[in-house]
Image (cartoon, rainbow, N blue to C red):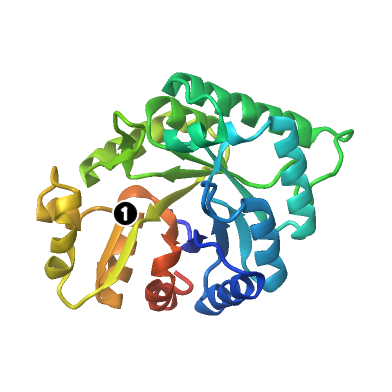
Amino acid sequence: MNRPFRFGVNMVTPSTGNEWRKKCRRAEQLGYDIILVADHIGMPAPFPAVVAAAEATQRPRVGTFVLNAAFWNPTLLAREVATTDALTDGRFELGLGTGYVRAEHDMAGLPWGTPGERVSHLRGTIEELDRLLASPEFQPRPAQQPRPPLLVGANGDRMLRLAAEHADIAAFTGGRAGPDGRPTVITAGDLDERVAFYRRHASARTEPAELNVLVQMVEVSADRRAAIRPFLSFIPHLTEDEALDLPILLLGTVEQMAEQLRVRRERYGFSYIVVLEPGMEAFGPVIEQLHGE
């Protein structure tokens, strides 16, 4: 049985306080259920940004999408998570990932490591967060018990097994890591296999996780094929039809985009949809179209 849709916007542009509050209130007006902040050098610092988002709004939840685990000491991260959850009156959701941009690790003077080392570090971080936040002795205490909902962004086998074991929300990237660590787009068929792999490892869960996908581009157009053609040079390994089938892209009229999301929810189970800040306004009418579904 499909979950109801939930919609988020991932804020990535640094702003002044007034600008930040204004665009967060605009996200609330457009119907977004959650306002999210990324964790990249050159973008807003996530924890003060989500607290400010919560202060500026009333209804939406707030969260990180996603924290780079290598940037954070687990004990200090537990303090940040608990404080942020308390300050936002239990509206906080924690998104975690391994990080995928080596240049950011180099800039921060942090080791890059192998993929296996990065996954092991993330697993250790999650296990330590669970231990600390569940302990009555740990202060400050989060508003949500035993901890805020956990989202894990994943694609590889080890990450998907980790998400199946720990995450309340499993986020699918629609890509795999290339030689430089950056994700390269996978086909819709490849994503079928990734979701199936996750489901096999999550089959013993008592409560199914919410499934999430990040939409990289929202393009309102009466001609979907014309809209995709300028971007084909960035995904030369895909045909035009394969590109149009990608769950990380939304192209077409508002009605067509709404139907694409219905089809993808049925196919993959994606009910929690996040768009990037540049697509926030364009996606608003799609949220209205799908309200209550």
Residue 223 image-quadrant placement: bottom left
Residue at 43 percent across and 20 percent down: it is 114
Expressed as whole percent of the image width and height from the top left, the position of residue 181 reads 36, 32
Is 158 located above or below residue 7 in the figure?
above
Quarter of the image with the C terminus is bottom left
Q: Is residue 257 above or below residue 210?
A: below
For label 1, the residue is: 248
Q: Secondary structure at mark 1?
A: loop
Tell whether 80 sits left or right of 178.
Answer: right
Question: How far across and how far down the image is residue 192, in percent?
Answer: 28, 41
Q: Is residue 229 left or right of residue 193?
A: left
Q: Amino acid at mark 1?
A: Ile
Quarter where residue 139 is shown: top right
Residue found at x 75% / y 41%: 146
Residue 58 visible? The answer is no
Position in image of residue 98 (x %, y %): 50, 33
Q: Residues within 10 Å of mark 1 (few under 14, many from 20)?
A: many
How many circles with numbers are drawn on the protein? 1
Q: Please say whether residue 41 is visible from this viewpoint.
A: yes
Towards the viewer: 102 or 123: 102
Residue at 40% of width from left, 51% of height from top?
Answer: 213
| Residue at the far right in the pictured view | 137
Q: Residue 99, percent across and down?
A: 48, 36
Query: In terms of depth relative to the viewer, which is nearer, 218 or 106?
Result: 106
- Which residue occupies the foreground of this view, 274 or 280? 280
